[in-house]
Structures are given as C-alpha cells and as structure tokens.
Amino acid sequence: MKKSDAEYDVVIIGSGAGGGTMAFAYARKNLRVLVLEAGPKFDPFKDYKLADKSWEQQGFPHKPGSQGRQTFAELQKLDPAHEDPRSWNAVIGKTNPTDRRRPYKYHHVRGVGGSTLAFTGESHRMHPESMQMKSRFGVAAYWPVDYKTLEPFYSEAEKIIGVARPTDLGTRWRSEPYPLPPRELGFGGQKLVAGAEKLGMNWGANARAALSKPCDDRPNCNYCADCNRGCRRTDKGSVDVTFLQKATASGFCTIQSGVTVTKIEAGADDRVKGVHLIDAEGKSAFLATPKLVVACGAVETPRLLLNSANQHAPDGLANESGLNGPVGYAQRVVGGWGHRRIRGCNVPVQVQEYIDSKK
C-alpha cells in the first residue's frame, strides 16, 4: 500500500458506529475519506444464515479476523447486601455462584460496520440528566455539550438509520416526530404489556432501528428476531447499510478491509504524521495523513493509543491524564429469557417508569 497524504483528506481507523458516521459526515462535505478496517466485509445476503434451517442454533456468523483478542483482569467483589440484581434462572439458581463479578464476553464484531452488525437495534437517546452526572452526583465529568445541542443531530441520525417508535414528549423531548411509525407488537410484546398492566406499570413500544415500513431502498422488518445474528434483509439500521452505504455512494469514501493499524506516528508538536499498518496481503506500510480519526471501539482504541507511545508521549498518545486503559465503562444489562422462542421483534417494549425516571 503506497499512499500519500495528497490522496486523502482524512483517514479513519475503524468502520463501526463511530467511524462509519464520521466517514458519512466527511464524504458529504466532498472530503476524500479512507476508512481502514481490520476485520472483513460481510455480505448480508450471503453471510447471514436466516435462510438456513438451523439458523436459530447459530450465533453471529463470525469470519476469520472478525473478533479481537481480549483478556479479563480479576473483577470486583460482590456485596452480599445487593443480592437482588444477581443473575439467576429457575434451573441452576445463581449463574455466578462466586463472590466476585465474573466476565462473560466482550460482545463485538470486527468488520465493516463494526458491532452494529450484531446489535439488537435499540436506538435510545441519552437522558438529558445523564449528561449532568458531575453536577448531580459529584461523579464522572462535565459534558462539553448538553441535550439541546445534540438534539438536531439525534434527529438526523434517526432518519438515516430508520428509527421507529410512537412519538412522545417524555424526558427526552424531540423537535420532530420519529421518522417511522411503531411496529405492531408481536406475541411476546403483547404478553409483556399484559403483565405490566397487571403490575400497574406503563409499557410502550421501544425505539428500534428496524424499519416498520420500507424506507431508503430497504424492506420493512419481518419480525424474524434475527438481529443479533446479522440482518439478512437489511431492514436493521446497521452502519454498513446506512452511513457507510451513503458515504461510498458519494464517490468520496473508500473502505479497505483487512487492514490493521499497528501504530500512530506523532511528532513533538502533538500533530499526527500518519499510521503504520499491515495491509490485507500482510505487508507493512506507512500511510501519511493530514487528518486522522481513531474509532476502533472501547478496547482497540485505547490499545492503539497506548501502543503508539513515543519520546514525546511516553505513556501513550492522548494519555496525559493516565486514565487511558485503566478506566473503562461497563454496561449493565438486566433481562429475562424464556424457554419458548416466539417470532417477533427483539426488545419490543420498554418501561416508561425507568426510561423517564429522574431518580
């Protein structure tokens, strides 16, 4: 790979939710974009197994190189005073019988489209007060922007992805309705709503990036519940069929898969000169770039920055605080699974009391 900084205005490392949207944003400004993706490209119509009889017995159809390597350090001790949130089932009891948090796995896909290829499709806006954790609780940090500033960008992204839900004003106020109407609830969703009503709780249709009607040359969702195995119909708004498709269609975006960036080279002036990489043929190369976007995900981004240490940044790039690497964010999930599989939309409903709570 012999490229010069004159051939591209910006190089983006990673093609997932962050890199894909950045590629779209630059390409629509007629800037020449090169996206470097370490993983392979997936073809929804060939690689996803919805048409196979055994599709329900399979997970996401990973290819060679579509998963990174991670290890887990010893996690925190569990407080016996907080037993209620612990995972359990009626057959074996506690799924983690130890006194420490136990890692399960790092859910991710390394490929063109990133982990959006396997995400469920939930498309929530952040709670406005989640951006005020420092002022409210004295933890985290102050956000440089607020919900009002982000709101028009939320609306634009929802149109491109194709988010469907009933429009309500709730805590996450909107300047315009959702782009698509809600889907009808399937059997499972109807059962959840009926149970919630018995408990006196308000349930509503979830905000999901699965088309409720054909849109932007993509068909409507068929309720197959195959979101996490890859959407063969392309109705789920993963980055490859939305932002990246639009970016490449502009003629200003090139995507190269199977390319691993090993180091970012920066100088004494804190300016990036370019990246060292291994291309799809296994050859090492250096690519100069005037602008660089690092969007490799929660694990690979800090790893790359730490591996890019030099005499001017001995602790790694962008690590003056020393927090790059030691500090991460874990998402806590509370869910329930039954033994009977019901055809219908994944995560069809949500509890308003939790979504809009200010407590």
Image: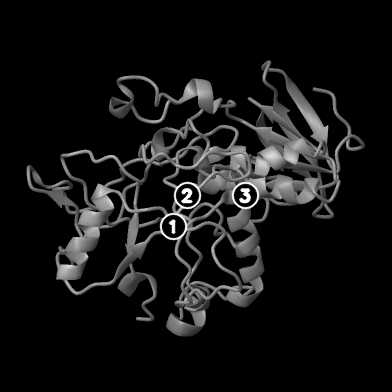
Residue tagged 1: 182
Give the structural element (helix, strand or loop) at label 3.
helix
Please tell me whether mark 2 or mark 3 is closer to you in this view. Answer: 2
The crowd level at tag 2 (other Cα within 10 Å; few <14, some 14-19, many 20+) is many
Residue 79 appearing in the image: no
Residue tagged 3: 18
Image quadrant in which you'd find residue 176:
bottom right
Question: Residue at the spot x=52%, y=55% of the render?
Answer: 163
Give the structural element (helix, strand or loop) at label 1.
loop
Q: Amino acid at mark 1?
A: Pro
Please tell me whether mark 3 or mark 1 is closer to you in this view. Answer: 1
Residue sitting at the far bottom: 135
Question: Residue at the spot x=45%, y=26% of the render?
Answer: 48
Residue 207: x, y in percent?
Answer: 44, 59
Q: Amino acid at mark 2?
A: Ser
Question: Residue at the spot x=39%, y=56% of the render?
Answer: 331
Residue sitting at the far top: 281
Residue 229 appearing in the image: yes
Quarter of the picture holding the C terminus: bottom left
Q: Earlier in the sequence, mark 1 or mark 2?
A: 1
